[in-house]
Image (cartoon, coloured by chain):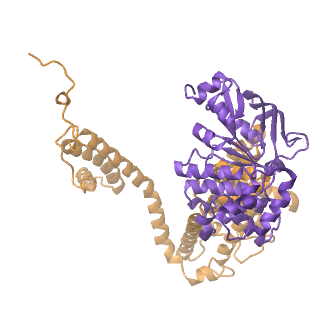
């Protein structure tokens, strides 16, 4: 199947293939076939790389994260694990310039999206966030909007006058991509807050993918969900990486080992000290033969 | 010989969810609090009658105190100490509520009783122009609505935008200063607002000028801080995660506010505006200074004096003319109309709130 083959296909060849796949796509086709080309309305492609160099993060005078160097690779899921307060979420939020929304927060160091520094002078944080989307810990659909409007929110906010038919197509693709379409297609005009927690979180993922970002950041997306909903989201993450670069913060180590390709372990020496990156590597290596003693203690549950 | 201390169940005093900790374990009938209250009133009435200085107010106040003591004693004897305390406090709270409500009920009762006499078709459809000892308040009702509407048109945008500034943008000393001045503004006596508006217009248009819009301006001075305060409270409870969700979609700040924050807060904002309007609609002093007194209809706030209900009531009472009672009736009818308008505003506020409120988690 077209959709399956695209999984391992990167680089310039991917585009024509994907276009072809898209043209053949029938609206009634099985979900597995439509998702990978369809999410966010963009053809399957090589997503972009995020690279952090010597990133230091502060809340006022408090040094929260120290000297992080890491690469978040395209079309892979990178899990950020570590004990509470070690700066995983802070680091994640610095990757799409959400960190600076906290009063007094500041950033030192470079973060580059395919070589372009997102903190360079003249870079518009709003533009950065259009390329690097985010899903939050608590499902947070807009309470004043219907399911449809929630998914279309990014389009409604940011682009002027999109034809209704295009919007319909994006909403359907995003909801299919988030495995939510079949559950909500008959009640798109109902408020998003009427869905269950797991459905709401998938709605938020659909909302984030509807604006076709390059990178998806997820901040503990399953911590407010039950195991069944969690599994659904994890499966979805596996699908989404065909389209996006994904970084996910999680406290759940099974989740990191199940859902991610690369794991980064953060830790802090003691509370009040800045958190730092201890080790990053392929997930199976981090969980089976980590290089650092600290990492081994953490993943084996002897600590933290 | 004493048995050794053990921790078997037998050593624990018998406990049951049914038994009360002390007392006889009974319970009072459901009418007990009312019975105690009525009994206490009768008792106080009897005592006062015996002493020869019976008054209803005194009977109610002493009756409430006696009722608290009586219900405590009664419950203590039958139900035990904990229930007795609960009943005494409940009675005290109910009494406090009753005392707080009494003036309101009494006021409504009095205004309705006296106001109904002056309410008739003419009251709403004629002015007092060229009428001796008669006429209606149509010009005052229209004036009140126009003056208040203009005040709202001035105050609502300023107030809501100021609240948005204070909640979404403001930081540091400027924000703190603004909060302080808004608090100060809330405390401005209304006559000062009237004099301010008068002095302001006098600068440009010369002394002795009185216009409807001057009244609106004076009322705005009173209304703006109320709108700011209520809008700020409502914006504060819009959860931050909704703003962040919008930011993460690559939305500029102003659009986050317009598309997410304001719609989420809409019901609360409307309620706040309605209540602020209700608060200023009955102002008298500033309007006496700024809009003046007039007998005829004026619908142009930018030209000439304009009557309003509060000043109308004041004037009918102050200078009743030849047919005193008719004038007094009209004053009360004006007061009743004013209260009715305020009530309608409140009902609208509630309906809007129910219709548009958003579940905020």
Q: Position of residue A274 (x, y in %)?
A: 70, 26
Q: Out of B122 and A177, give the one closest to the viewer.
A: A177
Query: In this rendering, would B295 be left or right of A190?
Result: right
- Corner quadrant of residue B101: bottom left
Indicate the quadrant containing the N terminus of chain B: top left, top right, bottom left or bottom right.
top left
List the single residue furthest toward the top: B1
Query: In this rendering, would B47 be left or right of B172?
Result: left
Q: Position of residue A61 (x, y in %)?
A: 75, 27
Q: Out of A55 and B314, give the one closest to the viewer.
A: A55
- Corner quadrant of residue A197: bottom right
Q: Tell me, yes or no, if residue B25 can be seen here.
A: yes
Name the colour assigned to chain A in the rendering: purple
Could you tell me which residue is drawn at 59 percent across and 46 percent down?
Answer: A222
Q: Which chain is orange?
A: B
Could you tell me which residue is drawn at 49 percent across and 75 percent down?
Answer: B116
Q: Position of residue B184 (x, y in %)?
A: 69, 45
Q: Is residue B78 above or below residue B258?
A: above
Q: Position of residue B160 (x, y in %)?
A: 72, 56
Query: In this rendering, would A183 be left or right of A5?
Result: left
- Corner quadrant of residue B221: bottom right
List the single residue furthest toward the left: B1
Q: Out of B163 and A172, give the one closest to the viewer.
A: A172
Q: Tell me, yes or no, if residue A252 can be seen here.
A: no
Q: Is residue B181 above or below residue B155?
A: above
Q: Is residue B94 above or below residue A188?
A: above
Could you tell me which residue is drawn at 73 percent across and 59 percent down?
Answer: A3
């Amino acid at each position: 199947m077209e959709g399956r083959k695209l999984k391992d296909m990167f680089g310039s060849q991917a585009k024509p293939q994907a276009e072809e796949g898209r043209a053949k796509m029938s609206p009634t086709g099985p979900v597995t076939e439509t998702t990978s080309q369809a999410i966010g309305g963009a053809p399957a492609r090589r997503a972009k790389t995020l690279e952090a160099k010597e990133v230091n993060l502060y809340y006022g005078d408090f040094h929260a994260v120290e000297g992080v160097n890491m690469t978040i690779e395209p079309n892979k899921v990178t899990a950020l694990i570590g004990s509470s307060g070690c700066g995983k979420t802070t680091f994640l939020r610095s990757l799409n310039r959400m960190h600076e929304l906290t009063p007094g927060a500041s950033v030192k160091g470079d973060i580059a999206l395919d070589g372009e520094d997102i903190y360079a002078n003249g870079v518009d944080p709003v533009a950065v966030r259009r390329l690097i989307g985010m899903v939050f810990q608590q499902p947070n659909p807009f309470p004043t909007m219907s399911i449809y409007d929630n998914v279309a929110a990014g389009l409604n906010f940011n682009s002027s006058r999109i034809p209704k038919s295009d919007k319909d197509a994006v909403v359907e693709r995003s909801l299919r991509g988030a495995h939510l379409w079949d559950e909500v297609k008959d009640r798109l005009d109902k408020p998003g807050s009427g869905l269950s927690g797991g459905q709401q979180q998938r709605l938020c993922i659909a909302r984030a993918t509807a604006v076709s970002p390059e990178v998806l950041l997820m901040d503990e997306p399953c911590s407010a969900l039950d195991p069944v909903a969690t599994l659904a989201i994890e499966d979805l993450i596996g699908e989404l990486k065909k389209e996006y670069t994904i970084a996910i913060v999680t406290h759940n180590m099974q989740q990191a080992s199940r859902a991610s390709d690369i794991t980064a372990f953060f830790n802090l020496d003691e509370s009040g000290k800045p958190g730092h990156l201890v080790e990053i590597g392929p997930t199976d290596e981090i969980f089976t033969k980590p290089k650092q003693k600290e990492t081994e203690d953490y993943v084996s549950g002897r600590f933290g | 010989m004493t048995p050794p201390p053990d921790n078997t169940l037998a050593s624990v005093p018998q406990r049951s969810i049914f038994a009360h900790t002390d007392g006889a374990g009974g319970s009072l009938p459901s009418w007990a609090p009312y019975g105690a209250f009525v009994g206490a009133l009768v008792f106080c009435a009897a005592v006062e009658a015996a002493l020869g200085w019976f008054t209803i107010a005194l009977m109610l106040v002493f009756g409430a105190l006696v009722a608290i003591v009586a219900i405590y004693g009664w419950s203590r004897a039958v139900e035990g100490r904990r229930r007795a305390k609960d009943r005494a406090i409940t009675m005290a709270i109910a009494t406090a509520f009753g005392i707080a409500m009494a003036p309101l009920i009494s006021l409504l009762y009095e205004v309705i009783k006296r106001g109904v006499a002056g309410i008739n078709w003419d009251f709403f459809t004629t002015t007092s122009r060229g009428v001796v000892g008669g006429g209606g308040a149509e010009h005052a009702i229209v004036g009140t609505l126009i003056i208040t509407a203009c005040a709202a048109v001035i105050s609502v945008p300023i107030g809501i935008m100021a609240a948005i500034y204070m909640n979404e943008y403001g930081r540091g000393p400027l924000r703190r200063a603004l909060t302080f001045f808004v608090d100060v503004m809330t405390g401005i006596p209304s006559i000062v607002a009237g004099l301010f508006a008068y002095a302001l217009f006098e600068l440009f248009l010369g002394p002795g000028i009185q216009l409807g819009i001057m009244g609106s301006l004076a009322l705005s001075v009173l209304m703006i801080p109320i709108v700011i305060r209520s809008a700020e409270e409502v914006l504060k409870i819009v959860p931050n995660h909704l703003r962040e969700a919008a930011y993460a979609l690559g939305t500029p700040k102003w659009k986050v506010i317009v598309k997410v924050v304001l719609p989420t807060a809409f019901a609360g904002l409307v309620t706040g505006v309605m209540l602020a309007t209700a608060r200023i609609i009955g102002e008298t002093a500033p309007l006496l200074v700024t809009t003046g007194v007039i007998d005829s209809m004026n619908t142009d706030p930018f030209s000439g004096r304009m009557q309003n209900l509060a000043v109308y009531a004041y004037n009918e009472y102050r200078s009743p003319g030849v047919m005193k009672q008719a004038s007094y009736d009209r004053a009360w009818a004006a007061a009743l109309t004013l209260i009715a308008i305020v009530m309608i505003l409140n009902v609208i506020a509630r309906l809007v709130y129910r219709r548009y409120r958003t579940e905020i988690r």
